[in-house]
Image (spheres, rainbow, N blue to C red):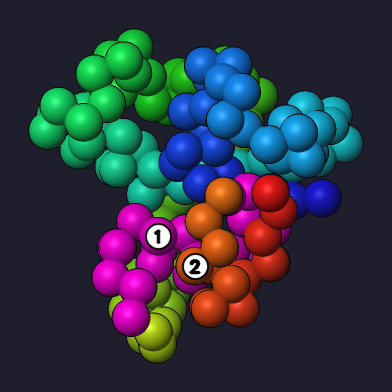
């Protein structure tokens, strides 16, 4: 299975948090799964850290790319096609980070690991 980790799923995985669902933990930990982390999540983490919203994730914010690779995940760059799809998605969801993750999941055929059911309005396949 090809997974795209929502930002909170990545952070909760790194922290070993009980907030991560059992199904998400099992899917991410499955060695046959291919888990990706979007460049949008790096943008979101560093932005929110700078704004003081994620003070407990200083180490992650300092080098998101290193954290991704150390955990065995693959980085997913943002392409022009991803950006265009994110901008074109209909619906009221205004979070640009979430819109990008939805676009990437749709275009790249990925299952989004997220607790946020709002993604389903975009037609995204979600695991939680």
Label at residue 115: none
The single residue placed furthest to the top in the displayed view is 59
- When the figure is inspected, residue 107 is found, relative to residue 15, above or below; the finding is below
Label at residue 98: 1
Q: Position of residue 64 (x, y in %)?
A: 39, 26
Q: Which residue is mark 2?
A: 118
Is disc 1 surrounded by few (<14), some (14 to 19) or many (20+) residues within 10 Å?
many
- Is residue 99 rendered magenta in the image? yes
Q: Earlier in the sequence, mark 1 or mark 2?
A: 1
From this viewpoint, is residue 106 visible?
Answer: no
Q: Secondary structure at mark 1?
A: helix
What span is colored magenta in the figure?
92-114
Q: Position of residue 40 (x, y in %)?
A: 37, 49
Distance of mark 1 from mark 2, alpha carbons?
A: 9 Å
Classify residue 45 as left or right of residue 17.
left
Which image quarter: residue 84?
bottom left
Q: Secondary structure at mark 2?
A: helix
From this viewpoint, is residue 111 visible?
Answer: yes
The single residue placed furthest to the right in the displayed view is 32
Q: Position of residue 118 (x, y in %)?
A: 49, 67
Tag 1 and tag 2, C-beta contact below 8 Å? yes
Is disc 2 surrounded by few (<14), some (14 to 19) or many (20+) residues within 10 Å?
some
């Amino acid at each position: 299975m090809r997974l795209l980790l929502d930002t909170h799923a990545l952070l909760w995985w790194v922290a070993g948090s009980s907030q991560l669902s059992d199904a998400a933990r099992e899917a991410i930990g499955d060695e046959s799964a291919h888990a990706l982390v979007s460049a949008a999540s790096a943008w979101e983490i560093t932005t929110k850290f700078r704004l003081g919203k994620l003070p407990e994730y200083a180490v992650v914010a300092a080098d998101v790319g290193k954290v991704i690779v150390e955990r065995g995940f693959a980085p997913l760059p943002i392409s022009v096609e991803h950006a265009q799809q994110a901008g074109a998605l209909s619906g009221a969801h205004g979070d640009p980070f979430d819109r990008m993750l939805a676009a990437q999941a749709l275009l790249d055929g990925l299952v989004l690991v997220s607790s946020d059911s709002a993604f389903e309005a975009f037609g995204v396949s979600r695991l939680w």
